[in-house]
Amino acid sequence: MSSNRPQDYKAVLGRFCTGVTVVTALDGDTPVGFTCQSFSALSLQPPLILICPSKGSTTWPRISRAGAFAVNILAAGQEGLGRGFARSGADKFAGVEWRPSPAGLPLLPDTLAWLECSIADERDAGDHTVVIATVDELGHGPADEPLLFYRGGFRTLNTKEATI
């Protein structure tokens, strides 16, 4: 069965579970960020990641101009951050505490992990931009369970049923 309908594409790819990240940066002195599910490890040597922001994003151009960003990997229980940073046209940092990374980028509290990255390349790809970034610093937080996105909604692991 072959289909080029967007709803079929979304229904099929929605069955691929992803982690949830919030990409943050500073635009001057102003913290900015957006929720990003299109995040992946790319290379171990050198350490590279990729993210794919939508071309419709009003936040990505501000982060791109900064040249560096942090990836905050959200933990179970951080659905509110995931939803808040997915909104358009709002001050996404209103009421959100953050601390500076080693380079001063916004790190969100109690995340699963974080990476501090420098933009290495940007490529046009359909309705998104593929961004390759070098990992400059990284660390993990106190949380140990990830926030997941599956079939249009946030999920968490049920570790009692998980097997390796």
Image (cartoon, rainbow, N blue to C red):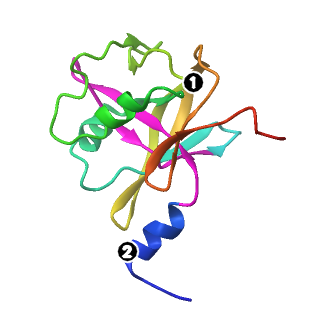
Q: What's the magenta bit mostly, secondary-structure-wise?
A: strand
* Magenta-colored span: 15-41
Q: Nearer the viewer, residue 151 or 73?
A: 151
Q: Earlier in the sequence, mark 1 or mark 2?
A: 2
In this orientation, does residue 145 appear? Answer: yes
Q: Amino acid at mark 1?
A: Leu
Tell me where residue 104 appears, x and y as whole percent.
38, 14
> Residue at point 25% right, 43% down?
61
Say whether residue 80 is magenta.
Answer: no
Q: Which secondary structure lies at badge 1?
A: loop
Q: Nearer the viewer, residue 99 or 67?
A: 99
Q: Which secondary structure lies at badge 2?
A: helix
Q: Return the residue found at the far right.
A: 164
In this orientation, does residue 131 appear? Answer: no
Disc number placed over residue 6 in the picture, else none: 2
Quadrant for the N terminus, please. bottom right
Which of the 4 quarters of the picture holds residue 126?
bottom left
> Residue at point 58% right, 57% down?
16
Q: Amino acid at mark 2?
A: Pro
Report, in whole angstroms, how far the alpha carbon at label 1 lies from the one at label 2: 32 Å
Please give left or right for residue 40 compared with residue 38 in the image. right
Tell me where residue 162 appears, x and y as whole percent.
76, 39
Q: Return the residue found at the far front.
A: 160
Q: Are marks 1 and 2 in contact (CB under 8 Å)?
A: no
Disc number placed over residue 112 in the picture, else none: 1
> Residue at point 59% right, 13% down?
142
